[in-house]
Amino acid sequence: MADSAIKSVEEVDKITLRVKVDKESNKVLYAEAVKDFVDVLFSFLTLPLGTIARLVATESNIEAVQFGSISSLYQSVKDLDQQYLWNQTCKKMLLKPRNSTETYCQKLNLNIDDTEPLQHFVCKYRNCIRKETGNCLIIFRKPQH
């Protein structure tokens, strides 16, 4: 099993990153990379902090990692009794927030957001209009059975 893990690591594509650094100020003046690398780098900015806190706590292969006070806040909401929120859905929205740019990030080479993808449903009746939304398109997470 260890051999297969080593092989998979060796087969990972390498990315060339050229960086020009001002040695006196120790600041990056210029960086050049392929589009995929830049896309992945920018995609980090689209992750909600709650998602980052959850992922660093659960996906670390060594031990649970703390993301400063964000991790403490996340854990506090996770431990919060249901009576302090309107319903369980409100708690889920805080603990597993949606990525507003989710559709743009789905095709990235590195996709670390573990949120379930949205599902779209359209009412089968042509003249149906929902009072809450004003349309027939309903977007929600897949129901858990």
Image (spheres, rainbow, N blue to C red):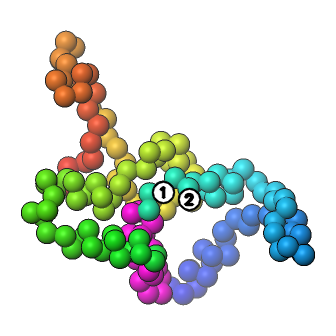
The quarter of the picture where the C terminus appears is: bottom left
The vertical placement of 40 against 137, above or below, is: below
Does the magenta-highlighted stretch encompass residue 116? no
Is residue 124 visible in this depiction of the protein?
no
Does the magenta-highlighted stretch encompass residue 60? yes
Callout 2: few (<14), some (14-19), or many (20+) C-alpha neighbours within 10 Å? some
- Say which quarter of the image contains residue 28: bottom right
Kindly identify the residue that appears in the image at 18 percent across and 17 percent down.
Answer: 128
Q: Tag 2, which secondary structure?
A: helix
Asked if labels 1 and 2 touch by Cβ distance under 8 angstroms, the answer is yes
Kindly identify the residue that appears in the image at 50 percent across and 48 percent down.
Answer: 106
Residue hosting label 2:
44
Q: Say left or right for 33 vs 143.
A: right
Q: Tag 1, which secondary structure?
A: loop
Residue hosting label 1:
47
Q: Say left or right for 120 vs 51.
A: left
Stretch of the chain drawn in magenta: 50-66
Given residues 54 and 118, the one toward you in this image is 54
User: Residue 144, how many percent across, how many down?
Assistant: 19, 55
Identity, as a three-letter code, of the amino acid under mark 1: Leu
Kindly identify the residue that appears in the image at 25 percent across and 48 percent down.
Answer: 142
User: Residue 94, how many percent across, how many down?
Assistant: 30, 58
